[in-house]
Image (tube, rainbow, N blue to C red):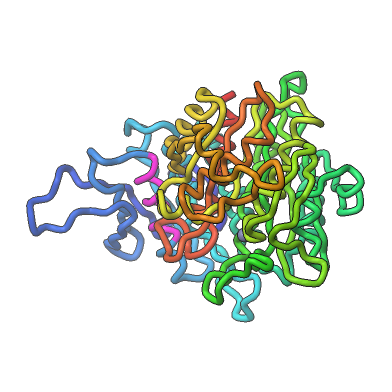
Amino acid sequence: MNINLISKTEWKEGLTFKLSFGKQDPIPGESRPTAGSILLMGKNLGEVSLGLENKINAETIRKTGAGIAKWLHGYDDLSIGIDLAGLDSLDVENPVLALCEGLLLGDFKFTEFKNKKSRKPSTINLLGDKKVQSEVDQAIILAEGTNLARSLAHTPANIINPETLSDICEKIAQENDLGFKVLDDKELKEMGAGAIVSVGQGSQTPSRLIVMEYKGKSPDKKPVVLVGKAITFDTGGYSIKTKTGIVGMKYDKCGGVTVAAILQTVAKLGLDTPVIGLIPAAENMISKEAYRPNDIITSLSGKTIEIISTDAEGRMVMSDTLTYAQREYNPEVLIDIATLTGGVVVALGGVRAGIFGTDQKLIDSLIDAGENVHERLWQMPLDEEYFDLIRGGDSDFKNSGGVTTASSVQGAIFLKQFIKNGTKWAHIDIAGTGTINKSAAYCPKGATGFGMRLITEYIRSL
Ligand SMILES: [Zn+2]
């Protein structure tokens, strides 16, 4: 989809949509205008609804854009106009940005491996004032980032493994003038990063730690350091998943690819704050080299971990990366994002991601950013008593309590063992929100890119 902003006089002729809304709650029995519903009134005139007037917000405007994007999926190479008149009088911040996000996110389809080539992209001519150009430009960058994260998450494990993911991140870095390096399994082993190495040692493509660096427009500021879990495929290892539970495990890299997309996005937006993206990548497989339950692993921090479940591998690769983040950088804040636990799905479903952390101000700011972009969070507890669930026998602690009790908190309190006093840290568990199993307003079934717009919004607010 291409989006242009032009004045009404430049738009010669063609199908033009006007924005409409319902005035009040309809009388019972009458249909309620839903955001994004389309009414054609002739060859050259249509209406797209913003929903009910008193319910309009950025999210309903996104849905309005998505309604048009979906409608366009039925056509090839169509050029339409959308009259922006009326949008600026709504009590919504950056309504054009929201509309364009809805259009572009709603346009996403993962068709790379389909022989039947999809339609030619449509062109949207937004008819409005030039002063909203920056909203259009920002929306294009933000949607590109989210759709990049979705697309990488969809790409299966026979294409994306730790090594090829590293190549992809290097290309993103080159295109966006980012710093890039990668530590391979030998370097990680030498460094003492036993946790990240052990998870990947059963795979033909062993672990990598991918590093992307955005200097920022104010390079003297302390960086925001992001850690994103990228298990390129998770069989569960010897604690193997069931034949239904294993399907979809290509999505266990959602956190990592989201971090790569955020680095691209902050660079394209030219934000002030320096941002470091750390992506521990591993494939959790079974082989004679694979790690086992009861193995005791020495992590980069020196702390020892007994493996109770080889399927609790995400926290392993994250733990060494959190240590590395605090050792190598001096983070203003440290934020990790991961499809970490089934427990968070039980607690919150696909509506909100769980957030845990050591710094309430950071948590509150992330929650606010999430409300702004409709990638919503819910704070979960991290009381010390939860540590009892993973307290060690023969090691300092275990990688899992081996019980489902508070399992999302088990994951979080495990990670907390690697956070130094004074580090402002937040952990976002997207196991429930990273993918959806039926299509939503502006996201088809599969990866959502959750966290991309949220964390970018947070960094932008600094
Ligand atoms: Zn797992």
Query: Is 63 colored magenta in this rendering?
Result: yes
- The location of residue 419, given as percent across then percent down, is 67, 32
- The location of residue 418, given as percent across then percent down, is 69, 35
Q: Is residue 327 visible?
A: yes
Placement of the N terminus among the 4 image quadrants: bottom right
Find residue 235 and report its image quarter.
Answer: bottom right
Q: Residue 307, relative to residue 211: is it above or below?
A: below
The residue located at (78%, 29%) in the rendering is: 329
Left or right, 295 with reference to 188: left
Left or right, 335 with reference to 384: right
Looking at the image, which residue sits at the far front?
393
- The location of residue 427, given as percent across then percent down, is 57, 39
Q: Residue 232, relative to residue 138: is it above or below?
A: below
Q: Is residue 11 visible?
A: no
Placement of the C terminus among the 4 image quadrants: top right
Looking at the image, which residue sits at the far top?
220
The residue located at (39%, 40%) in the rendering is: 58
Query: Is 146 colored magenta in this rendering?
Result: no
Which quadrant of the picture is home to ligand 1? bottom right
The residue located at (42%, 54%) in the rendering is: 346
Main SS, magenta residues:
helix
- The location of residue 173, given as percent across then percent down, is 79, 45
Q: How many marks?
A: 0
Looking at the image, which residue sits at the far left?
28
Left or right, 95 with reference to 227: left
Q: Nearer the viewer, residue 178 or 68?
A: 178
Q: Nearer the viewer, residue 222 or 97?
A: 222
Q: Magenta segment range?
A: 58-69
Q: Nearer the viewer, residue 134 or 127?
A: 134
